[in-house]
C-alpha cells in the first residue's frame, strides 16, 4: 500500500465534513478516493451531478505537489476556482484562452512557486510547446483528465488536443510518481475500452474502473415535435412562464442562442444568450448573473452550456437536436443536480439533423486533405527556401476547414510526419523525412460511429421508444436500466402541440424582420453593430437585395427596396438613441453600385457628414471574399490593404456602413485604418444591410 494511503485514509472523513461540509460520500466516491491514495490510476464513469470534482479536490489536500486538471469546460472551471479558493480554501488557478496573457502568466508563476494545490488547464494549451514545457516541469502528483471521453475516437466529443495528454503522462510519469484520474459521465463499453487503452499506454499501472448507474430518477424526460424556429419560439413563450425556477436552453448554433434569447426577452422572460463568440469578460458577467438568479434562463451552445454549474436548474430544454445520445445525456443531466424534481425537454424538428450532419462533415478529413496540408509544410533545408508555417498560416495556405486543420496536424504529429518547434516566439511546423502511408482507419471508423450516434439520437426523438431514460442508460452501457415510469413515453402523454395560427404568423414575421447583431471585437475596437437581414434565412428580401447590388442606382432615394428602407429607418432611430453619431463612413466595394447613394441617405437621416471615399484600397484584394475557402484566407486577403484618404473626422461615434459582412475581416481592416491612419478613437458602430455566413473549406455562403 502507498504510504500516502496508509497515513491519509483515516483523514478523508474528517476532511469531507470539516473542509467540504458534506456528511457522507456518495456511491463510488470513497472507493475512487481511496484507490487514488493507494496510487492506483482510476477511471470514474458516473452520472452528471454525482460530485466527480470531489474525487480530485479532496486528494489534492493530502497529496504532495500539485493536482493538474485538464478540462475543456471553461465556464465550469470558473465556478470551480470560486469554490476552491473561497469556499474550500484550496489555492487554485487556471490557464486557458478565456483569460488574458497576464492572468495566465500569474497562474504559471503561482504554480512554479509552489503556491497552488490545483491548476486547471484547457486541453488546447498542451498543443503549445512553451506551455507543455512549463507543465512537465511542475511537481504533478495527480493528473486529472476531465471529460475523459474526449480522449477516445469512439467518444461523442473527440478533441485532437486530448492526444497530447498521453504524451504529458509519459514525460511526467518517467520523472516522478504520478496518479491519473479520468472522469466522464458518458462512456459506453467501447469508449471505456478506448480510454483505458490510451491512458494505460502511458503507464505500467492498470486503470481501476468505477462505473455507477446512469439513472437520474428525478429528471422527467419528454420530446415535443415542432417544425421550424417560429414554432419553437411560440412554444417556449407559452411554456416557460409555467415552469418553476430557472433553466437552460441548448441551441446548436450561436445565432440560434441569440434568436431564442432575444425573442424570450422581448416577451418578458429574463433570458440571455451565452456562447463562445462573446468576449471573456462578458461570459464571466453572464455566468455570475445566472448563478445569482438575475436571469431565469440562459440560452447556450452545447459547448459552453455544459460549464454552467448551478445545482438548482429545474429544467433543461434542447431547442435543437444534439448530435448523439451521449451528448444529450450529459447536457440534460445539468438539470436537478440538487436531487429535486426536474424536467428535460427536447424540441424536435426532423430538419435539425442537417446542422449535426454539417458538424460531422466539418470534422472529417479526407485522405487528400492530409496531402494538401503537408504540401505547405516544408522540410528543413527546403530548396525553395520557404519559411516554416504557423498553424494560422497552414489554415490560410491550405484553405481547409479550421477544425479539419487541427485534426490533421494532431494526426501528422502523432504519426511523426510532422514536427513542431519554437522559432522567434512562433510555433511553427516542419515536415519530416518519414516515408510511407498514413494510417487513417480511425477516421473511417469515427465517421461511421458519429453517423450511427446521430441516428440513435433521431430514434430517441422520434417518439417510438418505450422509455426515454431507459434508452439513454442502455446506450451508455447501463445494462440494468429499467423503465423510469415517469417520462413522456412511459406515461404515454400526447406530445403533439397545437399552436395559434395567428400568433405563429406573427412570430414568423418577427424572425424574418429581426435585425442581426454584429458582435463587438475588443481587438479591432469595433462596437456592437447591427445587420438588417440574416442571410441564413434565405428570404426573398435577401435574395432581391443581393441581385440589386450590381444595379446602377438601386431603388428609391436610398437604393434599398421600400421594405428595407423602412427597416433601415427603424434601426437608425433605435441606435441613434444610444449613440449621437458624428459621421457616416462607407466601406469601399468593387461591385456594390449604389453604396454612395445609401451612404448619403443614411447620413441625411442622422444629420451628419458623409465620408464615402475616405476609405480606399491601397492594394486591391486578390479575390472577392466569397471566392475564398476559409476565414484565415479572407483575413489575409484584406489585411493591411486599405488606406485613409479623408480629412479629420468630427467628434462623435462613427457609423461604419457596408452592404454585408461575413467573417468581419473587412470591417476590422476599416477599423485598423481609422484608428491608426485617421488617428480617431471614437466608437465605431457597424451597420450592414445583411449578415452572411461563409462556408469554411469551400467557396460561397451558407
Image (cartoon, helix red, strand yellow):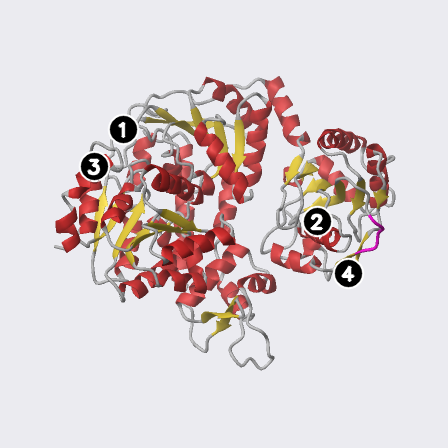
Q: Which residue is mark 1?
A: 483
Mark 4 or mark 2, earlier in chain = 4
Residue at the image position 49 percent from the left and 31 percent from the top: 289
Mark 2 or mark 3, earlier in chain = 3
Residue at the image position 66 percent from the left and 60 percent from the top: 636
Mark 4 or mark 3, earlier in chain = 3
Q: Nearer the viewer, mark 1 or mark 4?
A: 4
Dot 3 alpha-carbon crowd within 10 angstroms: few under 14, some 14 to 19, many 20 or more = few
Dot 2 alpha-carbon crowd within 10 angstroms: few under 14, some 14 to 19, many 20 or more = many
Tell me the tag on residue 620: 4
Question: Could you give the CA–CA distance between mark 4 and mark 2, rounded to whole angstroms?
Answer: 16 Å
Tell me the tag on residue 27: 3
Q: Nearer the viewer, mark 4 or mark 2?
A: 2
Labels 3 and 1 touching (C-beta < 8 A): no
Question: Could you give the CA–CA distance between mark 1 and mark 4, rounded to whole angstroms?
Answer: 65 Å
Q: Which residue is mark 2?
A: 667
The one of 592 and 305 positioned closer to us in this rendering? 305
Dot 4 alpha-carbon crowd within 10 angstroms: few under 14, some 14 to 19, many 20 or more = few
- Residue 600: image quadrant is top right
Query: Is the magenta region chiefly helix, strand or loop?
Result: loop
- Secondary element under disc 3, as helix, strand or loop, is loop
Report the magenta residues as a range.
Answer: 644-648
- Secondary element under disc 1, as helix, strand or loop, is loop
Regarding residue 335, the answer to whether it shows in the image is yes
Labels 1 and 4 touching (C-beta < 8 A): no
| Side of 640 where 338 appears, left or right | left
Q: Up-down: is 269 above or below 120?
A: above
Point out residue 606 in the picture as x, y percentages from the top left corner: 81, 34
Question: Could you give the CA–CA distance between mark 2 and mark 3, rounded to whole angstroms?
Answer: 55 Å
Point out residue 334 in the picture as x, y percentages from the top left corner: 38, 34
| Side of 677 where 4 appears, left or right | left
Amino acid at each position: 500500500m502507498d504510504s500516502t494511503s496508509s497515513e491519509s485514509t483515516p483523514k478523508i472523513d474528517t476532511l469531507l465534513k470539516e473542509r467540504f461540509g458534506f456528511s457522507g460520500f456518495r456511491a463510488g466516491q470513497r472507493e475512487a478516493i481511496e484507490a487514488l491514495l493507494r496510487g492506483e490510476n482510476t477511471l470514474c464513469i458516473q452520472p452528471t451531478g454525482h460530485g466527480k470534482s470531489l474525487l480530485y479536490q479532496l486528494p489534492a489536500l493530502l497529496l504532495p505537489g500539485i493536482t493538474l486538471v485538464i478540462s475543456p469546460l471553461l465556464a465550469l472551471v470558473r465556478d470551480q476556482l470560486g469554490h476552491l479558493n473561497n469556499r474550500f480554501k484550496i489555492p487554485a488557478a487556471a490557464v486557458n484562452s478565456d483569460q488574458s496573457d497576464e492572468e495566465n502568466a500569474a497562474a504559471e508563476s503561482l504554480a512554479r512557486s509552489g503556491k497552488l494545490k490545483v491548476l486547471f488547464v484547457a486541453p488546447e494549451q498542451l498543443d503549445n510547446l512553451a506551455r507543455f514545457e512549463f507543465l512537465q516541469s511542475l511537481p504533478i502528483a495527480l493528473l486529472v483528465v476531465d471529460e475523459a471521453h474526449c480522449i477516445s475516437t469512439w467518444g461523442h466529443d473527440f478533441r485532437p488536443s486530448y492526444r497530447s495528454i498521453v504524451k504529458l503522462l509519459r514525460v511526467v510519469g518517467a520523472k516522478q510518481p504520478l496518479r491519473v484520474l479520468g472522469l466522464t459521465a458518458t462512456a459506453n463499453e467501447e469508449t471505456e475500452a478506448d480510454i483505458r487503452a490510451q491512458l494505460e499506454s502511458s503507464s505500467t499501472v492498470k486503470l481501476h474502473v468505477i462505473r455507477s448507474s446512469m439513472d437520474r430518477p428525478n429528471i422527467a424526460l419528454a420530446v415535443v415535435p415542432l417544425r421550424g424556429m417560429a414554432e419553437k419560439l411560440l412554444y417556449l413563450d407559452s411554456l416557460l412562464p409555467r415552469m418553476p425556477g430557472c433553466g437552460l436552453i441548448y441551441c446548436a448554433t450561436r445565432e440560434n442562442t441569440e434568436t431564442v434569447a432575444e425573442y424570450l426577452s422581448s416577451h418578458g422572460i429574463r433570458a440571455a444568450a451565452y456562447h463562445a463568440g462573446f468576449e471573456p469578460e462578458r461570459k464571466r458577467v453572464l455566468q455570475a448573473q445566472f448563478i445569482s438568479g438575475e436571469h431565469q434562463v440562459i440560452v447556450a451552445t452545447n459547448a459552453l452550456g455544459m460549464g454552467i454549474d448551478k445545482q438548482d436548474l429545474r429544467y433543461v430544454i434542447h431547442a435543437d437536436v444534439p448530435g448523439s445520445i451521449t451528448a444529450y445525456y450529459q447536457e440534460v443531466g445539468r438539470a436537478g443536480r440538487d436531487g429535486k424534481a426536474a424536467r428535460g425537454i427536447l424540441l424536435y424538428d426532423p430538419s435539425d439533423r442537417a446542422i449535426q450532419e454539417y458538424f460531422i462533415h466539418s470534422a472529417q478529413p479526407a485522405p487528400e486533405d492530409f496531402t494538401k496540408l503537408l504540401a505547405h509544410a516544408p522540410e528543413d533545408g527546403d530548396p525553395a527556401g520557404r519559411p516554416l508555417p504557423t498553424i494560422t498560416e497552414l489554415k490560410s495556405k491550405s484553405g481547409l476547414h479550421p477544425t479539419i486543420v487541427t485534426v490533421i496536424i494532431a494526426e501528422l504529429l502523432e504519426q511523426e510526419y510532422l514536427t513542431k518547434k519554437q522559432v522567434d516566439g512562433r510555433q511553427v511546423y516542419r515536415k519530416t523525412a518519414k516515408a510511407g502511408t498514413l494510417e487513417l482507419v480511425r477516421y473511417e471508423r469515427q465517421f461511421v460511429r458519429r453517423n450511427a450516434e446521430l441516428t440513435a439520437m433521431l430514434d430517441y426523438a422520434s417518439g417510438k421508444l418505450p422509455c426515454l431514460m431507459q434508452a439513454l442508460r442502455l446506450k451508455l452501457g447501463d445494462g440494468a436500466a429499467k423503465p423510469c415510469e415517469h417520462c413522456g413515453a412511459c406515461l404515454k402523454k400526447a406530445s403533439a402541440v397545437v399552436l395559434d395560427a395567428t400568433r405563429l404568423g406573427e412570430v414568423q414575421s418577427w424572425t424574418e424582420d429581426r435585425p442581426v447583431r454584429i458582435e463587438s471585437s475588443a481587438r479591432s475596437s469595433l462596437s456592437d453593430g447591427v445587420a438588417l437581414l440574416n442571410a441564413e434565412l434565405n428570404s426573398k428580401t435577401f435574395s432581391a437585395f443581393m441581385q440589386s447590388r450590381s444595379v446602377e442606382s438601386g431603388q428609391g432615394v436610398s437604393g434599398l427596396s421600400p421594405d428595407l428602407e423602412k427597416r433601415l429607418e427603424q434601426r437608425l432611430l433605435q441606435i441613434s438613441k444610444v449613440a449621437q453619431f458624428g459621421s457616416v463612413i462607407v466601406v469601399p466595394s468593387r461591385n456594390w453600385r449604389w453604396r454612395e447613394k445609401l451612404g448619403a441617405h443614411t447620413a441625411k437621416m442622422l444629420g451628419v457628414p458623409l465620408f464615402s471615399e475616405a476609405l480606399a484600397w491601397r492594394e486591391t484584394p486578390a479575390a472577392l471574399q466569397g471566392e475564398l475557402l476559409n476565414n484565415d484566407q479572407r483575413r489575409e486577403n484584406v489585411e493591411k490593404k486599405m488606406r485613409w484618404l479623408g480629412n479629420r473626422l468630427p467628434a462623435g461615434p462613427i457609423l461604419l456602413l457596408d452592404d454585408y459582412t461575413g467573417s468581419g475581416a473587412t470591417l476590422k481592416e476599416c477599423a485598423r485604418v481609422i484608428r491608426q491612419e485617421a488617428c480617431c478613437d471614437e466608437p465605431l458602430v457597424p451597420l450592414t444591410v445583411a449578415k452572411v455566413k461563409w462556408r469554411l473549406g469551400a467557396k460561397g455562403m451558407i
